[in-house]
Amino acid sequence: MLALSGVACGGSGGGCTADKATALSGPLTMHGRAFSPNCFKVGSGSTISVDNKDTIPHTFTIRGSNVDLHLVGGQAGSATAPAAGTYDFVCTIHPGMKGTIVVT
């Protein structure tokens, strides 16, 4: 279910709005040098579980916040959603890995 949800709305703000964003109900996955979903929404202060299914390291970095989670291949972790707003997120190691989070 989550793997298909990011396809409808691209990352980096390009069309990712509260109406289009997927309500995150499981972990945010990193696989194939991509985030899935890449357009999602969560409540402020909620826990975002992140699962790196690749064999290489990635980061989950939310621009404009203090979220900067570093995960080696196969590692899982979690971060706390920032204040309400719309944020871009990226892997700072692989800048092509990006998305948008809508925090309510």
Image (spheres, rainbow, N blue to C red):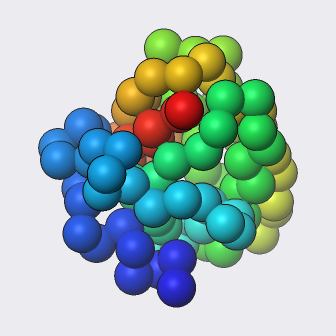
The percent position of residue 11, horizontal first and vertical second, equals 29, 48
Q: Quadrant of residue 89?
A: top left
Question: Residue 24's x, y, as percent?
Answer: 60, 60
Of all residues shown, which one is farthest toward the left?
14
Q: Is residue 94 above or below residue 73?
A: above
Whether residue 47 is visible, yes or no, is yes
- Residue 67 against residue 1 in the figure, above or below: above
Q: Nearer the viewer, residue 99 or 68?
A: 99
From this view, report whether residue 97 is shown above or below residue 7.
above
Between residue 101 and residue 52, name the one nearer to us. 101
| Residue 15 horizontal/vertical position (percent) | 17, 47
Residue 71 in percent (x, y) is at: 74, 50
Residue 56 seen in the current view: no
Is residue 23 placed above or below 89 in the rendered structure?
below
Q: Is residue 103 left or right of residue 34?
A: right
* Residue lying at 72% horizontally and 47% vertically, measured from the top left: 48
Q: Residue at x 40, y 28 (%)?
A: 86
Q: Nearer the viewer, residue 24 or 72?
A: 24
Q: In the rendered view of the protein, which quadrant contains the C terminus?
A: top right
Left or right of 45? Residue 57 is left
Q: Is residue 80 left or right of residue 55?
A: right
Taking the spot 28% from the left edge, 72% from the top edge, the residue there is 7
